[in-house]
Image (cartoon, rainbow, N blue to C red):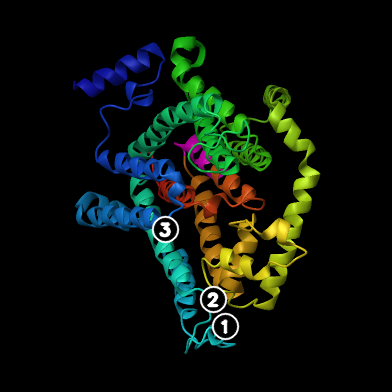
Amino acid sequence: MTANDITRERARSTGGAQPAERLRLWPPPQEGWLPILGVLLLYAGHLLYGALISDVSLLMGMAAAAMLGVILIHPRLREDLLRLKGLAAPAVLFLLTIAVGLWTLTPWIPGGAHPVWAYVGVRPGASTIDRSATLIEILKLLGLACVFLVGAATGARDARARYAIRLTLAVGVVFGLWAFIGSATDPIYRPQGHRLEGHFHNPNTAGTFFAVLLMLAISELTRQLRLEGRRRSLADSLPYAAPVLLFAACLLVTASRGAMMAFLGGVVILIVFRLATGGLKLSRAVIGLLAGALLLIGAVAVAGETLIDRLFQSHEAAIVRTAIWQAHWQAFLDSPLFGYGLGTAETVNKTLISVSNYPILWNIKAILNLYLQWLEEAGIVGTVPMFLSVALLIFTSVRNGLGRSRMTGVMASLLAVDAIFLIHGATDFGLEVYSIAALWSWLLGLQFSLAQGSSRR
């Protein structure tokens, strides 16, 4: 009998989980260097102010491309990646968006070159109003595609996928403690009052980030409680409960209304998927637990004075956002098919400033609505294939995930994370922050490949 067999027999005899099922970051699984490098790349972007500077975001994309090159050279990882099914259609749609972006760099497009090029005396001009911004945005998108494939290779094996999630949470605990202590002790560090920002320069972006970590941490905690059963103790659960409490506190201190609402939307998706896969049974106990959880969230929210103050100011914020959206919606209607070029939202905004809207538009860097910003930049022709590509990836993950017997809790949390990004994108610009977009790309790749796994892997 081998050592592994003895370990399994001991686990069965005690009624507990195997050691491999418990929280363990060392030693890493086979090819564990891949999730380690992926997590380090993402957090490096978070620390470098969300990789908002183009040079940093391009370096992230180059690093992801180099990692993808290593994956394609490595026989086992290459096999894992090539085994994935359902990537062809999303890839074609994504490349179509890239092709449209490249097309807008030329004047040979329906409608011709934008008039701004003739105004400044540049011929032949281009459809985009800013060639350099569009070219950089195309390179960024290609970098995100590489990040997605790195995530897909990581999630092709259950052990690597679980290790990647745990490592993300472990590094997130360090990041969260640093951000929380910094927001509480350094007034220079928090220019927007008492709201936590991390290094994202925006508390709403930090809210998206910590809502994602909280969702993943809840999944790990519930799994641990289920594995331990009646034998669970405080010492067993503490390594899983502590991150949940920390990320919940960080999310609360960001005082982000959109992130809180997006998180609640993610909770709904989590519950629905768990019910669909049999992870939860719709019983009185579950209904009571959900009601209690909602009451707890409400009680914690009431304790956060800053959040409540901002909730009561939602009407004022809605007025400002509505004014921004109206101006940019009209800009989209003026060029609905191909837009003004990828990455040009800030430039377009400057052209919209007038005496009447100056107080609202003079200093915004994004439209505060991901969907409207994409329509304005890429037009209908460039936006539809991109959104269809993401929708196909998520649909394929859901369809395949419903057929899995293992890792369903992780799958549910990753689909809930999708909801967080998509819901908050309707009222903010978190996905326009490159490191946040890279985080979702990585998790999207992770869930896409994980959904196709089997109990053997």
Q: Position of residue 414 (x, y in %)?
A: 51, 42
Q: Nearer the viewer, residue 353 or 456?
A: 353
Amino acid carrying mark 3 in the image: Ser
Quarter containing the C terminus: top left
Residue 54: image tag: 3
* Front residue of 57 and 226: 57
48 above or below 84? above
Task: Describe the element under mark 3 as helix, strand or loop.
Answer: helix
Which portion, as a residue range, is magenta? 405-416
Asked if 412 appears above or below 103 in the picture, the reply is above
Q: Please give the residue where the numbered disc 1 appears in the rendered image.
A: 114
Classify mark 2: helix, strand or loop. Answer: loop
Residue flagged by tag 2: what amino acid is it?
Ile
Location of residue 83 with respect to 164 vertically, above or below: below
Dot 2 corresponds to which residue? 129
> Label 1: few (<14), some or many (≥20) within 10 Å?
some
Name the foreground residue: 187 vs 380: 187
Q: Nearer the viewer, residue 83 or 164?
A: 164
Cα gap from disc 1 to disc 3, whole angstroms: 24 Å
The amino acid marked with disc number 1 is His
Left or right? Give the position of 3 relative to 52.
left
Q: Are marks 1 and 2 in contact (CB under 8 Å)?
A: yes
Q: Residue at x 45, y 28 (%)?
A: 178
